[in-house]
Image: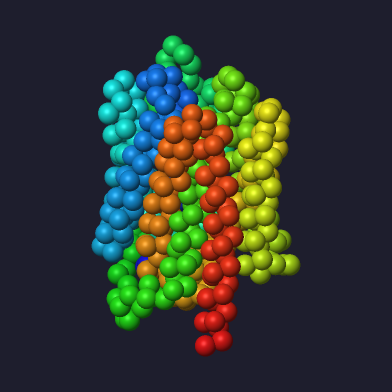
């Protein structure tokens, strides 16, 4: 992470141009990240795929995302975050366009390339914005990630409004890929002034001490399962909605839209929530709401009931991710900021496992409702991991 002088309070001209552009690219990245769940029904019909075959799209994208995240770390250590963002945005644009190839293997390759772009772009933009706003990090990162959330919210209506049986996804992908490619070009052309350029940080001492601690791996395991749950719910809710309704659900207030809307807006409850709850109690409250929401959603016989379950699930899961990451940093101090890559890699692998698991169970049983029970198993496991984390943290505190 960069160390920037105190005279950085006044942002240079390059930063004034760069900052809004980064926010626009982050918004488009939000659409690109969750696009996979919105286009699954299209590929199901186009290639006559089973749920087990549909599940292959998720490992393709998330494997790319893991690779992109690792590559982003290399760029970050060399203070080339802007270059990582340029390559990531261009990769997302190319991958999204490849979804129109008409050949299943090339479509899967497109999802993989999109994942690489996501893995490069999201960490790099977060760190760039952090380095440009060291005097107000929390508010700057909150605003940035709101843009990603806004992209996730509009993804379903965006796909519904821009795709049809005749043109397929061509218009949709063009509308998303062209501004991503343009953003990559503009980012390449905008210079970063010396005040904005990251300075290498001295290497931390102590080797891998953080990851020798059981608490770190317990929190990473929680992250693995919870990010898997978020991805599984977001990735399959559109397909599941069609199974419940018996037809494509294209109305604006679809269960998918409501889930992502409350998933993002629910994070605004965090500051209020922490007036009355500590981190662990807030997480337990969120898990209880998620379990209630899942019970309503997975027993739904109508879109209205599924929408209600999606709303409660979205609210419940909204603050768990940032609270768990905050818990990680609070537990280990400054070392955590420098050595958090395994935490986020665990999250991406968890997303692959749960999303693929839903499709695999559905394929074996012949019913997506059984596949969605993987989400219930994930929440039950999270309750167990939460108990383990509280126990380990308590022993560590008293040691």
Tell me how the rendering is colored: rainbow
Quadrant housing the N terminus:
bottom left
Q: Tell me which residue sits at (71%, 61%) in the image.
A: 272
Hey, which residue is sitting farthest front in the picture?
365
Relative to 351, 82 lies left or right: left
Hey, which residue is sitting farthest top in the picture?
166
Q: Tell me which residue sits at (31%, 20%) in the image.
A: 102
Q: Taking 258 as reference, is 14 above or below it? A: below
Which residue is at the front of the view, 388 or 58?
388
User: Which percent across, then down, holds residue 152?
Assistant: 53, 40
Which residue is at the front of the view, 200 or 398?
398
Which residue is at the front of the view, 194 or 337?
337
Res 283 quadrant in image: bottom right
User: Which percent across, then down, holds residue 344?
Assistant: 41, 58
Q: Taking 114 as reference, is 322 above or below it? A: below
Q: Tell me which residue sits at (26%, 62%) in the image.
A: 78
Q: Tell me which residue sits at (48%, 20%) in the image.
A: 163
Residue 202 visible somewhere in the drawing:
no
Relative to 237, 117 lies left or right: left
Residue 217 visible somewhere in the drawing:
yes
Q: Taking 259 as reference, is 12 above or below it? A: below
Which residue is at the front of the view, 19 or 347?
347
User: Which percent across, then down, holds residue 335?
Assistant: 41, 75
Res 76 quadrant in image: bottom left
User: Which percent across, then down, holds residue 380?
Assistant: 58, 55
């Amino acid at each position: 992470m960069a160390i920037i002088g105190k005279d950085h309070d006044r942002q240079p001209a390059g930063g004034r141009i760069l900052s809004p552009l980064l926010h626009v690219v982050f918004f488009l990245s939000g659409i690109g990240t969750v696009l996979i769940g919105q286009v699954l029904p299209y590929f199901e019909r186009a290639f006559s795929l089973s749920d087990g075959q549909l599940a292959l799209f998720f490992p393709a994208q998330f494997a790319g995302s893991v690779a992109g995240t690792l590559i982003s770390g290399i760029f970050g250590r060399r203070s080339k975050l802007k270059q990582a963002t340029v390559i990531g945005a261009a990769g997302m644009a190319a991958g999204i366009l490849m979804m129109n190839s008409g050949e299943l293997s090339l479509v899967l390759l497109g999802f993989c390339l999109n994942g690489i772009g996501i893995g490069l772009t999201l960490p790099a933009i977060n760190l760039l914005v952090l380095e440009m706003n060291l005097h107000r990090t929390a508010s700057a990162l909150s605003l940035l990630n709101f843009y990603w959330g806004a992209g996730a919210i509009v993804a379903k209506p965006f796909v519904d409004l821009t795709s049809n049986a005749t043109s397929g996804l061509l218009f949709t992908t063009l509308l998303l890929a062209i501004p991503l490619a343009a953003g990559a070009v503009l980012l390449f052309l905008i210079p970063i002034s010396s005040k904005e350029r990251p300075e290498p940080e001295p290497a931390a001492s102590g080797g891998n001490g953080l990851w020798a601690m059981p608490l770190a791996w317990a929190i990473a395991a929680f992250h693995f399962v919870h990010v898997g749950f978020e991805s599984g719910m977001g990735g399959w809710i559109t397909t599941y909605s069609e199974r419940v309704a018996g037809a494509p659900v294209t109305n604006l207030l679809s269960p998918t839209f409501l889930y992502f809307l409350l998933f993002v807006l629910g994070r605004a409850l965090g500051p209020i929530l922490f007036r009355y709850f500590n981190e662990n109690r807030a997480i337990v409250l969120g898990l209880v709401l998620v379990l209630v929401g899942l019970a309503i959603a997975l027993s739904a016989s109508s879109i209205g009931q599924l929408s209600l379950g999606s709303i409660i699930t979205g609210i419940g899961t909204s603050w768990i991710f940032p609270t768990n990451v905050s818990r990680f940093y609070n537990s280990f101090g400054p070392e955590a900021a420098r050595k958090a890559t395994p935490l986020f890699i665990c999250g991406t692998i968890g997303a692959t496992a749960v999303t693929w698991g839903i499709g695999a169970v559905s394929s074996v049983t012949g019913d997506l409702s059984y596949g969605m029970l993987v989400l219930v198993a994930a929440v039950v496991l999270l309750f167990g991991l939460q108990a383990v984390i509280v126990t380990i943290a308590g022993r560590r505190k008293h040691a």
